[in-house]
Amino acid sequence: MLSPPRTPSPSRSCLNSTSASLDLNVPTFDQLAATIRDRFPDLSPQFQAGAAFLLDYPDEVAVLSMRKVAERAKVQPAAMVRLSQQLGFPGWNELREIFVSRVRTRPEPLTSRARSLVKGGADNHLGRDLAQAQSHNLELTLAQNAESVIDAAKTLKKAPHVHVAGFRSCYPVAFGLLYGYRLFRPSVSLISGEAGTLEMQLRGIEKRHATVVVSFAPYSVEAVRVAQATIERGAKLIALTDSAVSPIALNADHTLIFSHESPSFFPSLVAASALAEMLVAQLLALEGKEAIANLEQAEAALHSQGAYAAN
């Protein structure tokens, strides 16, 4: 279940009254989820249980009846109706339509995109289109995260230990961040879950620690589990993801959003990697002279131990 955000948003000035309502013009799931997250601390326990189910199981909301949703959320059916009205909708059906629309517009399956790519054939435009998409992703990602990266780096610097996690296609991004960070900070570790050891590794997350999780839609269940464990243990969570309301971002202390549009069959991770590199660079700048000394020692050790081929 979704836990209440640890830090109330400063934008909730109109939420002291039970009559506060969502703008009826909100057309997307992302906007609705952001509003629910913002208002969550002010909702009654019944409404919190219902709202948490809406965000945790949006696919089920799209296909189940209101009574079944209420049963799964462990609230009375009338509570779901009242929650809908609390959020500014005439009733349940109007609220549910947001979730139905989300299912209709979910990311296109990779196989569908691959078929379109093959059908179109390979020509000299594909490379150009890929380059243009990567450039756009980088520009958008850098513009969105200039200040956020600094704030996230400050949080990581304060943590006595930092964990990094990324699964499947996000693993290279997470590993790249870990590798660069470990060159000047020893207290950084990778949560990889190899050989079914995810739960064992999660036990290493402690209060005051910080965890960086990388994931994009469709979100890895392992990434969501790492994010949940981080919140449960009272550690700080930094999400590198594609949406402010992704499962790993909803309760994150800092969210860094990357764009991954691509004319190819698979989403691009160029901007995600750039974001990770930005974070490492900012961390080195914050650590200062101690980081330089650690980096010098690490670099010398790599050379002395024969890590690199001789020129």
Image (spheres, rainbow, N blue to C red):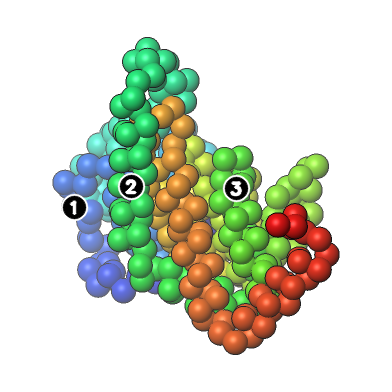
Vertical placement of residue 119 versus 199, above or below: above
* Quarter of the figure that contains the C terminus: bottom right
Q: Position of residue 40 (x, y in %)?
A: 39, 61
Spot the residue most to the right: 305
Q: Is residue 67 left or right of residue 301?
A: left
How far apart marks 3 and 1 lie (CA) works out to 40 Å
How far apart marks 1 and 2 lie (CA) works out to 35 Å
Spot the residue most to the bottom: 289
How far apart marks 3 and 2 lie (CA) works out to 20 Å
Q: Position of residue 47 (x, y in %)?
A: 40, 54
Name which of mark 3 and mark 2 comes first in the sequence: 2
How many C-alpha atoms fall within 10 Å of the one at disc 2: few (<14), some, or many (≥20)?
A: some
Q: Is residue 201 left or right of residue 159?
A: right
Q: Position of residue 74 (x, y in %)?
A: 52, 45
Q: Amino acid at mark 2?
A: Ser
Q: Amino acid at mark 1?
A: Asp
Residue denoted by label 3: 172
SS state under label 3? helix
Q: Which mark is residue 23?
A: 1
Q: Is residue 291 left or right of residue 247?
A: right
Q: Which mark is residue 135?
A: 2
Which tag is nearer the camera, tag 3 or tag 1?
Answer: 3
| Front residue of 267 and 52 | 267
Whether residue 281 appears in this view of the structure is yes
SS state under label 2? helix
| Front residue of 262 and 199 | 262
Vertical placement of residue 206 versus 310, above or below: below
Residue drawn at (62%, 80%), measured in percent from left and top?
Answer: 291
